[in-house]
Amino acid sequence: MRMHFGAAAAAFLLIVGMGAAAAEDVVIQPEQDTVIREYVKKQPLASVKLPGVELNVGTALPDTVELHEVPNVKYRYVVIDNRTVLVDPGTRKIVKVYD
């Protein structure tokens, strides 16, 4: 009986953890994505280098990185290592990396 309870508790924690991770996923609507892509193309930025920082969704950027506004979009952007990165300005975490 004790073994079944432990397995059930572990399964519950795994499911709860997966739900929390999914809640952090950012969904950018296709219309908003088009607006972002077009704006970024018209407003090119110089690429900055950030040695040791991996460009992955969820990575927080240092405060030294200047984030640039996209009108009518809550996210900001910056170009790092020639890749446009969309960032949540509140957490400074990367929400999307454009290639």
Image: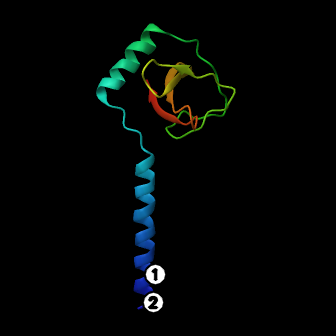
**Which quarter of the picture shows residue 61?**
top right
Residue that sits furthest to the left in the current view: 30
Quadrant (top left, top right, bottom left, bottom right) of the N terminus: bottom left
Q: Residue at x 50, y 22 (%)?
A: 83
Instruction: Between residue 83 and residue 93, name the one nearer to us.
Output: 93
Number of the label disc, if any, that sits on residue 25: none
Q: Mark 2 packing: few (<14 Cα in 10 Å), some, or many (20+)?
A: few
- Tell me the kind of residue under disc 2: Arg
Q: Secondary structure at mark 2?
A: helix
Query: Where residue 20 sits in the image (x, y, percent)?
Result: 45, 55
Quadrant (top left, top right, bottom left, bottom right) of the C terminus: top left
Q: Secondary structure at mark 1?
A: helix
Number of the label disc, if any, that sits on residue 2: 2
User: Which residue is the site of mark 1?
Assistant: 6
- Tell me the kind of residue under disc 1: Gly
Q: Is residue 41 above or below residue 66?
A: above
Circles 2 and 1 in contact, beta carbons < 8 Å:
yes
Query: Where residue 94 sits in the image (x, y, percent)?
Result: 52, 34
Q: Mark 1 packing: few (<14 Cα in 10 Å), some, or many (20+)?
A: few
Query: Where residue 57 sits in the image (x, y, percent)?
Result: 49, 38
Residue that sits furthest to the front in the current view: 72
Q: Residue at x 58, y 23 (%)?
A: 67
Apparent side of residue 50 relative to residue 13 in the rendered image (left or right): right
